[in-house]
Amino acid sequence: MTIALLLLLSVLVIAALAAYGRYRPGRRERALREVLDAADALEAQLRVARAEIEAVAGSGGEDPVGEAMREMLRQRLWLRDHGREASVDQLDEVRTSIDAARDRIDQQLSRIAQARAPLA
């Protein structure tokens, strides 16, 4: 009787672990979600940067944010086409690239804020 009970308990524990593993997002899924979240944040930041640049320099002439927006679109298209089969390392590389771009935009926004400060 105790052997049957232990066997039943073992089967239940294994089934519970299998169910937990199936519904818990893995490292790859988490990495993909983080890349998409970072891309959304960068896109929002680029829109802010564009508005700030236009406020300082006007809307005519060069669009320094345009190339970054196009690169963001290229990354989103790559994710759409290859994200499902991309390795965790590839996803981490894309995330690192997006984070670096966000850092560069932050620096540019800081410079714009400093340039506007004496005018205020």
Image (cartoon, rainbow, N blue to C red):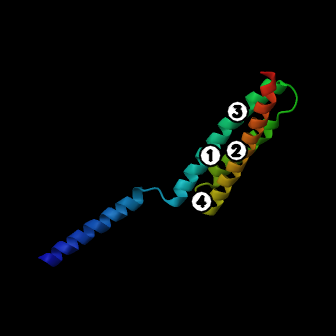
Disc 1 designates what residue? 38
Instruction: Name the residue at 37% across, 59% down.
Output: 20
Instruction: Check the image and name the residue furthest to the left.
Output: 1
Q: CA distance from mark 3 to mark 4?
A: 30 Å
Crowd class of label 4 (few under 14; some 14 to 19; many from 20; radius 10 Å): few
Q: CA distance from mark 1 to mark 2?
A: 9 Å
Task: Name the amino acid, label 3.
Answer: Arg
- Dividing the picture into quadrants, the one containing residue 65 is top right
96 sits to left or right of 111: left
Q: CA distance from mark 1 to mark 3?
A: 14 Å
Chain-order first, disc 4 or disc 2: 4
Q: Is residue 87 at all visible to an observer of this figure?
A: no
Chain-order first, disc 1 or disc 3: 1
Image disc number at residue 47: 3
- Dividing the picture into quadrants, the one containing residue 52 is top right
* Mark toward the viewer: 4 or 2: 2
Task: Name the amino acid, label 2.
Answer: Arg
Disc 4 designates what residue? 85
